[in-house]
Image: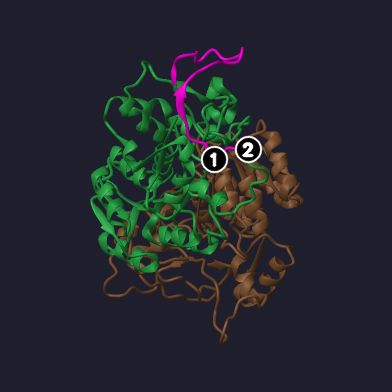
Chain colours: A brown, B green
Amino acid sequence: MTCVCGSDLWPWRGAEPIGDPHPMGHEYVGFVEEVGSAVTSVKPGQFVVGSFATSDNTCANCRNGFQSNCLHREFMSTCQADYVRIPNAQGTLVATDDIPDERLWPGLLAVSDVMGTGWWAADAAEVKPGSTAVVVGDGAVGLCAVIVAKELGAERIIAMSRHETRQNLAREFGATDIVTERGDEGAARIKELTGGIGADSVLECVGTPQAMHQALHSARPGGNVGFVGVPHDDAVDGQELFFSHVGLRGGPAPVRRYLPDLIDRVMGGRIDPGKVFDLTLPLDQVAEGYKAMDERRAIKALLTP
Amino acid sequence: MTCVCGSDLWPWRGAEPIGDPHPMGHEYVGFVEEVGSAVTSVKPGQFVVGSFATSDNTCANCRNGFQSNCLHREFMSTCQADYVRIPNAQGTLVATDDIPDERLWPGLLAVSDVMGTGWWAADAAEVKPGSTAVVVGDGAVGLCAVIVAKELGAERIIAMSRHETRQNLAREFGATDIVTERGDEGAARIKELTGGIGADSVLECVGTPQAMHQALHSARPGGNVGFVGVPHDDAVDGQELFFSHVGLRGGPAPVRRYLPDLIDRVMGGRIDPGKVFDLTLPLDQVAEGYKAMDERRAIKALLTP
């Protein structure tokens, strides 16, 4: 089972070169069909969850918890297909204890990227129990980030969104406040809501200069911004960062680090990030999935075999 | 007692507008002559240490430990003089228990800026016991940062410097390795020294794009860079930061947070950051102090009344 990611829209729109026609996509769950001779961690017939970045899970960076910076990393890029080969399968895949109920598959699929990325955003932004967290961006990652802020015990979770469907899902996931203003007005509203000083943690799930500026100005001095959208167009202003006293960390999420825990949370029914999928299509209608997301008719499109 | 800061050289060189003639400088220790009616924390006759950023030490940002982002902050700017008025004196100044021996005055003066800033660099870079720390920059702040890395228990302290006098002082302060290469070569050398993955903490004490690039490429994924030189010329590349998985935090040092502890370390003889002063001049020869630092004949010039 696979899906369409917001980041897939960049090449789809022609904003990134793509070369010859090839399959796309980097999110996946499914059954193991066959393993290479060196693979002992999973076996045919098991249901597995992976990550968009493969990792051997043994190198120094993996041991430090940064599997998405594995010395042998390969990024997945052909997952919108019936079958996919997973490099570094031994370190990348995590099998569930039992075959999960089909209704859990979308949640587990979300774990392979958007939910894992939301967790990383909150981790990088150092969300702590009792704190105030702001989520910038109401795409699938931003919405999952709301789930994480709640799981990590944030007392106040402010989602920045002006789309009613997404606001509702954010509230369902645990948002305590919705802010519809953007840019400097949005940051000013956050300051108003936080005693004039800003939020402890801001989860920047967009990647534009506007979103980064808004995030830095929404965090308090000494607070943290986690950024998980690939930054475009000189998104980070060094002097702005300097005088903000805000800590900034981001990058491709080390999803592998979180997989066992996130699989448990989904399998145990504690969280349901699968709710971000509001459109389901058979794989051969994948083009409509891109179109619906591009036109913001859908948050995220699930593709079934 | 006061001194000349590397940052004073920017306006001195004409690289920043200065307007009408006025005293300069923001580093100071000395005796209290007179206090305002609201000041109860210090009294005339006491020896006090302050910070280049004044703070009430009671607002939310101060309580969070970011006194250099105090809601009532004023930056000091007239300290190269016989007398200076300290705004927010109540929250800014810390008196020593007794009048310190004169030989300790330079060390206490260093605490008011360069030593406090070095501490902040290490704090922002999250230097931990047993870790590897790299210091980029061999000015007074960089050299003080070496002291801090040692105080915080770093096992390996790599100073990047190509000036023999400064290398020697770095070694005296606790550096275990000296790297003379710069830029990508310097970062490659750090990787060589750290098992191919980079250092846990990098203390960037310069502020140029070259130094920041070198710092980001010297830290390991998941490591931290503390940056304390005001960044010039778009020093931070957002995509470089993103893919590095490095945490970045900086800003004007919250020296006030560290003052009581640093005063104790100097008064107790545990550290002697006063060694960064390698030129002493009477206040009326301040111009020669600027000149000697600009020509790199001196690390830092001390000015006596």
> What number is the disc on residue A268?
none
Q: Are marks 1 and 2 in contact (CB under 8 Å)?
A: yes
Percent position (x, y) of residue B173? Answer: 27, 43
Q: Is residue A180 visible?
A: no
**Mark 1: amino acid:** Gly
Comparing A190 with A81, the one in front is A190
Mark seen at residue A198: 2
Q: How many neighbours does mark 1 have within 10 angstroms: few (below 14), some (14-19), or many (20 or more)?
A: many
Q: Could you tell which of marks 1 and 2 lies nearer the N-terminus? A: 2
Check disc 1 and report the residue beneath it.
A223
Q: Between B271 and A6, which is closer to the camera in this rendering?
A: B271
Q: Vertical placement of A25 versus A229: above or below?
A: below
Pick out the residue farthest to the front.
Answer: B284
For badge 2, the amino acid type reads: Gly
Is residue A41 shown left or right of residue B300? Answer: left
- Whether the magenta-drawn stretch holds residue A111 is answered as no
Residue, x 62% and y 58% (percent of image)? A206
Question: Which portion, as a residue range, is magenta?
Answer: B22-47
The residue tagged with tag 1: helix, strand or loop?
Answer: strand
Vertical comparison of B243 with B279: above or below? below
Asked if the magenta segment contains residue B39, the reply would be yes
